[in-house]
Amino acid sequence: MRWWKAAQAHLPPHEALPEQLQLLMQAARDSGISLAKADYKPQQEARANVLRYQITLPVKAKFSNVQLFIVNALQSMPTLTLESVTFRRERIESGTVEARIQFVLLVRKAITR
């Protein structure tokens, strides 16, 4: 259990959530993607000092840009994980895809006294 406490120490604090979301938006911009909407919701981890934020992003872009965004986001945010991604293309000749990307961001819970 000692390793888990050490791992938690490397998580960003809950108070850093706005900065973490800015990093995610920057990864999108760097990948040529404009994020029109982002939904995120906290999920309490049982018996842990950790919050999981499930982040859902609907994206419409070239397939290669979506791939680049996912890679950039994961590389720039060590506590971000890819939960799922689904792709849809209206027409085979279309240059863009609609993607629904779900990430999970782990942060340390705020300490309450």
Image (spheres, rainbow, N blue to C red):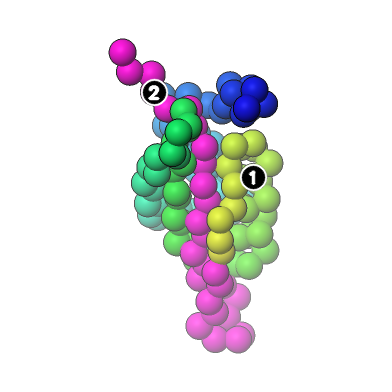
As displayed, is residue 36 above or below residue 92? above
User: Identity of the amino acid at label 1?
Assistant: Leu
Which of these two is toward me, 108 or 70? 108
**Viewer can see residue 34:** yes
Name the residue located 56 percent from the left edge and 64 percent from the top edge: 85
As displayed, is residue 102 above or below residue 42? below
Q: Secondary structure at mark 2?
A: loop
In this view, the residue farthest toward the front is: 1
Name the residue located 45 percent from the left edge and 39 percent from the top edge: 45
In space, the residues marked 1 and 2 are separated at their CA atoms by 24 Å
Residue under pointer 1:
74
User: Which badge, 1 or 2, comes first in the chain's sequence?
Assistant: 1
Which of these two is toward me, 47 or 19? 47
In this view, the residue farthest toward the left is: 113
Q: Position of residue 100 (x, y in %)?
A: 49, 64
**Viewer can see residue 10:** no
